[in-house]
Structures are given as structure tokens and as C-alpha cells.
């Protein structure tokens, strides 16, 4: 079932990351399921193996350089050199600017931006050696600005610049870099937002669907399908792009 290439998906114990790990495994990648908690990773990795794929659960905090270097080395050793990297790990610490603490700011910037930087830096040598690589960074429709998310929108906009620069630097080695910017996706992250706002999740979902041209919210599989294309052989001429997957026309 595998075609011999290895992919890493961060934040893959649940939500969009878990759906992406399962999808890339179904596409034939050996998949490193990376998250903070290795036991939570193991669950997704075992699901993939039960479905006939190849997977390894690895606990890595993407903000910690030593854990990133050691984890990527272990993945290269046990699964094969990672030539696909999906930087999906993410957190929210929403607050209006006047209430936003320095730690709210730093932790969000660290997981999204520092994490994507450390992971890409650790993986790039495997990609350039293979003269093939695919990097996909998870941005967000919030990159265009969203009330209560000064930290998150700055991080998600920053990831777009990071993506374009990687595309410019790594293109000559057969490596593409793209960003996928989801709109409203039904996951624990959006459930946490509903809870913080004191709105029942069902009502929150119904409202989001009513504001979306296709009249539904997104599912993790919607994002996984776009990432699957960007990681494919045939997507080799798509690089430095930001693809909004939001059920309507954002840009
Ligand atoms: P989620 O359900 O909250 O999952 C995020 C995962 O990232 C969790 O498993 C979390 O682990 C992990 N993580 C957090 N910090 C980490 C770290 N330092 N190192 C490694 N893993 C870490 O989120 P999601 O909704 O699937 O979102 C996935 C990505 O899409 C995020 O980058 C998010 O910003 C982006 N996005 C989501 C939406 C949406 O509507 N859901 C929209 C736009 C963009 P723990 O569970 O242990 O904390």
C-alpha cells in the first residue's frame, strides 16, 4: 500500500491533523503522527496500521528545538526520510487586545511560527537530498483579521510569508511549499471557541453555516483532501500559494 515516501503531520492526534494523517496514509505515505502526547498519537497511528497503512506515533513539542531535531531523526530512522511536512499543530489563546497577556501572544506565535520554522528546518535536508519535497503550512481565514485573535491572525498571516519564502528558496531542489487557509472547520478548536463565548456548539455551527456560501461548515476531511493534492506528485508546479478552503471566496 505504501509508495515508500514518508510524511510528517504535526498536531495529528485529533482534528484536521488526524484526518490529514489518515488521508496521506491512504494516499500511500508512511505517516509520522506527531503531537504533544505520544499516547494520543499512538491511537491515530494504530488506526492507520489497522487500515493497512504504515504509521508511527511520535511525541514532539514543535516549539522545542531539541525535541524537533531528535523526533525528526527518529522518524527518518524508523519510517524513512520525511519528504512531506504538514505544519498543522496549533493553539488559540483568544482575547481582545487590551486583555491579551504576553503569554497569550508568545505561546500562539511560538506554536504556529517557531514550530513551523523548526520543523521545516529539520526536514529540509531530507527533501533536498531526495530532490522531492512538499511542505504544507496551515494558515487560516483569520489571517485577514479576526476580532479577539490579534496573536492568531498575526501568526497565520506570518505563515503565509514563511510559505512563500520557502517556495522561493527550495524550489530548485524539487520542493514546493504552500499554505492551506481553512475557514470554519468543525473540530475541538472551534468547540473551545463556542464554549469560551458561552454559545452551545450546535448553535455556533448553525450560525457559521448560515454565513458560509455553501451553507455548511467544513469538516477536517475537506482540508485533508486539499493537503493530499498539494502533497501529490502532480502538484509539483503549484508552489508559494495560499489556498483558502472556506466554502466561499476569501483571498
Ligand atoms: P485542534 O483540534 O485543536 O488540534 C490541534 C492539535 O495540535 C492538538 O492535538 C494539539 O495537541 C496539537 N498541538 C498544540 N500545540 C502543539 C505543540 N507545541 N506541539 C505539537 N502539537 C501541538 O485543532 P484543529 O482545529 O484541528 O486545527 C489544526 C490546524 O488548523 C491549526 O493550525 C489551526 O490553527 C488551523 N485552523 C483550524 C481552523 C478550524 O476552524 N478548526 C480554521 C483555520 C485554521 P493538544 O491536544 O495536546 O493540545
Image: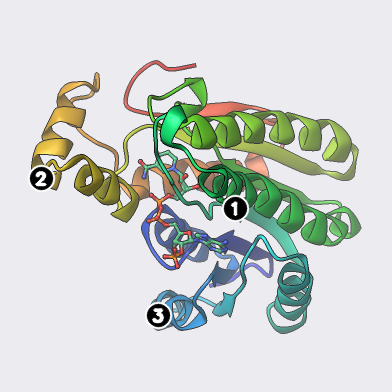
Q: Which residue is mark 3?
A: 43
Q: Which residue is mark 2?
A: 200
For label 1, the SS is: helix
* Residue located at (73% from left, 35% from top): 162
Spatial separation of the CA atoms under disc 2 and disc 3:
28 Å
Quick check: is the Cβ at mark 1 less than 8 Å away from ligand 1?
yes
* Residue located at (11% from left, 34% from top): 206
Mark 2: few/some/many CA within 10 Å (<14, 14-19, 20+):
few
Mark 1: few/some/many CA within 10 Å (<14, 14-19, 20+):
many
Quick check: is the Cβ at mark 2 less than 8 Å away from ligand 1?
no
Residue 146, percent from left and from top: 41, 24
Spatial separation of the CA atoms under disc 1 and disc 3:
23 Å
For label 2, the SS is: loop
Residue 221, percent from left and from top: 35, 49
In the figure, is residue 137 to the left or right of 11? Answer: right
* Residue located at (42% from left, 77% from top): 40
The answer to which image quadrant residue 102 occupies is: top right
The answer to which image quadrant residue 223 occupies is: top left
Residue 141, percent from left and from top: 44, 27
Residue 210, percent from left and from top: 15, 23
Amino acid at each position: 500500500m505504501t509508495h515508500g515516501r514518508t510524511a510528517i503531520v504535526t498536531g495529528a492526534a485529533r482534528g484536521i491533523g488526524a484526518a490529514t494523517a489518515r488521508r496521506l496514509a491512504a494516499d500511500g505515505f508512511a505517516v509520522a503522527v506527531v503531537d504533544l502526547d505520544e499516547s494520543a498519537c499512538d491511537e491515530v497511528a494504530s488506526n492507520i496500521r489497522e487500515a493497512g497503512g504504515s504509521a508511527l506515533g511520535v511525541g514532539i513539542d514543535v516549539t522545542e528545538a531539541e525535541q524537533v531535531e531528535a523526533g525528526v531523526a527518529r522518524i527518518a530512522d524508523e519510517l524513512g526520510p520525511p519528504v512531506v511536512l504538514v505544519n498543522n499543530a496549533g493553539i488559540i489563546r483568544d482575547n481582545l487586545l487590551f486583555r491579551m497577556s504576553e503569554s497569550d501572544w508568545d505561546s500562539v506565535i511560538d506554536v504556529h511560527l517557531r514550530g513551523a520554522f523548526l520543523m521545516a528546518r529539520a526536514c529540509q535536508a531530507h527533501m533536498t537530498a531526495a530532490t522531492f519535497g512538499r511542505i504544507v503550512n496551515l494558515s487560516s481565514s483569520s489571517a485577514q483579521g479576526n476580532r479577539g485573535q490579534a496573536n492568531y491572525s498575526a501568526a497565520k498571516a506570518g505563515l503565509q510569508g514563511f510559505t512563500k519564502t520557502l517556495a522561493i528558496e527550495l524550489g530548485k531542489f524539487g520542493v514546493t511549499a504552500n499554505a492551506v487557509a481553512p475557514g470554519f472547520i468543525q473540530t475541538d478548536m472551534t468547540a473551545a471557541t463556542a464554549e469560551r463565548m458561552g454559545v452551545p456548539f450546535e448553535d455556533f455551527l448553525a450560525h457559521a453555516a448560515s454565513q458560509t456560501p455553501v451553507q455548511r461548515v467544513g469538516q477536517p476531511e475537506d482540508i485533508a483532501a486539499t493537503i493530499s493534492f498539494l502533497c501529490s506528485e502532480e502538484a509539483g508546479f503549484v508552489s508559494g500559494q495560499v489556498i483558502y478552503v472556506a466554502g466561499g471566496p476569501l483571498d
